[in-house]
Image: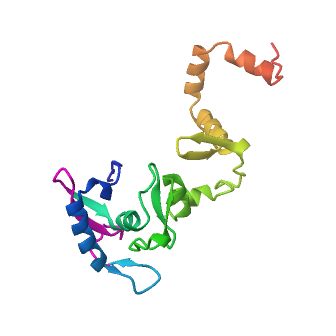
């Protein structure tokens, strides 16, 4: 499994005027503006996003995303902390009218990836409603509280030695539990 370290994307603000002019000269011939979407016909990343290479002010080669370059050239700087969402759902499109700066979370929810599909669910796989009262939240995970309690109960029944060991470490727990649940124990 590959893990990607997220870093801030490069911007045309990292270019000096000479390299910015060169970028503009080689950028627009690689854009097909015949349709509604302006399709990038140059080099593409593995998911279909356009890529253009330039040299930064520090004389370093940098890869720039074509849709980000188009937006910055025609609209302006992308606000800090926001990413561009392709409203047309075409990754090769560089038309700034089809790009909207949104947070990364909103961009993921608008897509068809797992976070978006899970966020739309209103019932768990066992049919329990996923309401705020019935959710246990962990980092980026929504869990059904009913299913979680049932799974814990099943595990405890299969592992009675753990339960005995835990009760020895916490001697007052069962008497307090019986009082809370109004269970009378005959002596």
Can the viewer see residue 136? Answer: yes
Count of numbered circles in the view: 0
- Residue 101, horizontal then vertical, whole percent: 49, 59
> Is residue 174 shown above or below 116?
above
Give left or right: position of 21 versus 3: left
Name the residue located 44 percent from the left edge and 49 percent from the top edge.
80
> Is residue 30 shown above or below 46?
below
Can the viewer see residue 43? Answer: no
User: Is residue 45 highlighted in magenta?
Assistant: yes
Please name whichever residue, 57 or 108, is drawn nearer the observer in this view of the structure: 57
Q: In which quarter of the image is the C terminus?
A: top right
Name the residue located 44 percent from the left edge and 79 percent from the top edge.
37
Please name whichever residue, 62 or 7, is drawn nearer the observer in this view of the structure: 62
Residue interval drawn in magenta: 41-61
Residue, far front:
17
Name the residue located 45 percent from the left edge and 61 percent from the top edge.
84
Give left or right: position of 51 versus 140: left
In the picture, residue 110 is in which quadrant? bottom right
Predominant SS of the magenta segment: loop
- Residue 71, horizontal then vertical, whole percent: 41, 65
User: Is residue 28 highlighted in magenta?
Assistant: no
Please name whichever residue, 105 or 15, is drawn nearer the observer in this view of the structure: 15
- Residue 13, horizontal then vertical, whole percent: 31, 55
In the picture, residue 133 is in which quadrant? top right
> Is residue 70 shown above or below 115?
below
Name the residue located 71 percent from the left edge and 51 percent from the top edge.
128
Colour logic: rainbow
In the picture, residue 118 is in which quadrant? bottom right
Residue, far bottom:
34
- Residue 28, horizontal then vertical, whole percent: 30, 76
């Amino acid at each position: 499994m590959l893990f990607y370290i997220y870093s801030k994307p490069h911007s045309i603000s990292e270019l000096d005027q000479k390299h910015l002019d060169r970028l503009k000269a080689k950028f627009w011939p690689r854009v097909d503006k015949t349709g509604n979407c302006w399709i990038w016909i140059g080099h593409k990343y593995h998911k279909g996003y356009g890529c253009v290479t330039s040299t930064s002010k520090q004389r370093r080669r940098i890869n720039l995303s074509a849709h980000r370059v188009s937006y910055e050239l025609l609209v302006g700087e992308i606000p800090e902390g926001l990413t561009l969402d392709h409203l047309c759902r075409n990754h090769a499109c560089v038309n700034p009218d089809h790009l909207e700066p949104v947070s990364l979370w909103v961009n993921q929810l608008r897509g068809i990836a797992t976070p978006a599909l899970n966020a739309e669910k209103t019932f768990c796989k066992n049919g329990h409603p996923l309401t705020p009262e019935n959710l246990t939240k962990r980092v980026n995970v929504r869990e059904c509280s009913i299913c979680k309690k049932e799974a814990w109960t099943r595990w405890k029944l299969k592992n009675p030695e753990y339960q005995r060991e835990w009760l020895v470490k916490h001697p007052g727990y069962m008497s307090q539990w019986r009082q809370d649940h109004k269970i009378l124990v005959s002596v």
